[in-house]
Image (spheres, grey):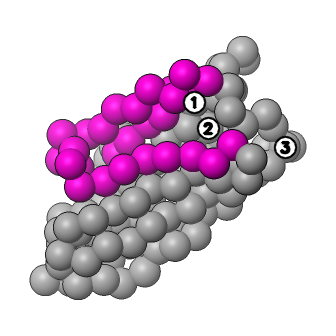
């Protein structure tokens, strides 16, 4: 059974930094595609950043480029999102997502709240 558990959210002032973590269990880790999504109140869930398969190619939403960095530690089976220069518009619930490479099965974590005050 695949489980994704996020941590690291919280309240931060604009311009500050946070690092989110997502610990995965129940599946191989390094070969899968993993991503961070976010959902603000009244908004659709949107892709923030993604790290693709074993090659580890990354891509980012335009709104977070040059401020956020996605990475993973395969030995720890943990995905990270380093968020710098945070803005109030980054306020949202952030979700970890895993897509299994060979089956396409899609899994979500429970989400962690990030609130950026102005």
Label 2 sits on residue: 98
Query: For the residue labelled by badge 1, is the local secondary structure a helix, a strand or a loop?
Result: strand
In this view, 114 is above or below 40: below
Residues in magenta? 48-74
Q: Residue at x 65, y 28 (%)?
A: 32
Q: Residue at x 32, y 73 (%)?
A: 17
Q: Is residue 62 magenta?
A: yes
Label 1 sits on residue: 33
Query: How far from the left and from the top, in percent, is residue 51?
Result: 48, 34
**Relative side of 109 to 113, left or right:** right
Q: CA distance from mark 3 to mark 2?
A: 12 Å
Q: Are marks 3 and 1 in contact (CB under 8 Å)?
A: no
Q: Are marks 2 and 1 in contact (CB under 8 Å)?
A: yes
Q: Is residue 45 visible?
A: no
Q: CA distance from mark 2 to mark 1?
A: 6 Å
Q: In the drawing, what numbered circle is on residue 26?
A: 3
Query: For the residue labelled by badge 2, is the local secondary structure a helix, a strand or a loop?
Result: strand
Q: CA distance from mark 3 to mark 1?
A: 15 Å
**Relative side of 11 to 76, left or right:** left
**Name of the residue lying farthest toward the top:** 102
Q: Quadrant of the N terminus?
A: top right
Q: Residues within 10 Å of mark 2 (few under 14, many from 20)?
A: many
């Amino acid at each position: 059974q695949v489980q994704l558990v996020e941590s690291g959210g919280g309240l931060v002032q604009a311009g500050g930094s946070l690092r989110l973590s997502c610990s995965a269990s129940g599946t191989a880790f390094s070969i899968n595609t993993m991503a961070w999504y976010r959902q603000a109140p009244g908004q659709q869930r949107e892709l923030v950043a993604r790290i693709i398969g074993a090659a580890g190619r990354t891509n980012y939403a335009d709104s977070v480029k040059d401020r956020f960095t996605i990475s993973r530690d395969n030995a720890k089976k943990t995905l990270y999102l380093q968020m710098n220069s945070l803005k109030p518009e980054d306020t949202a619930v952030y979700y970890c997502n895993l897509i299994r490479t060979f089956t396409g099965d899609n899994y979500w974590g429970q989400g962690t709240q990030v609130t950026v005050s102005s």
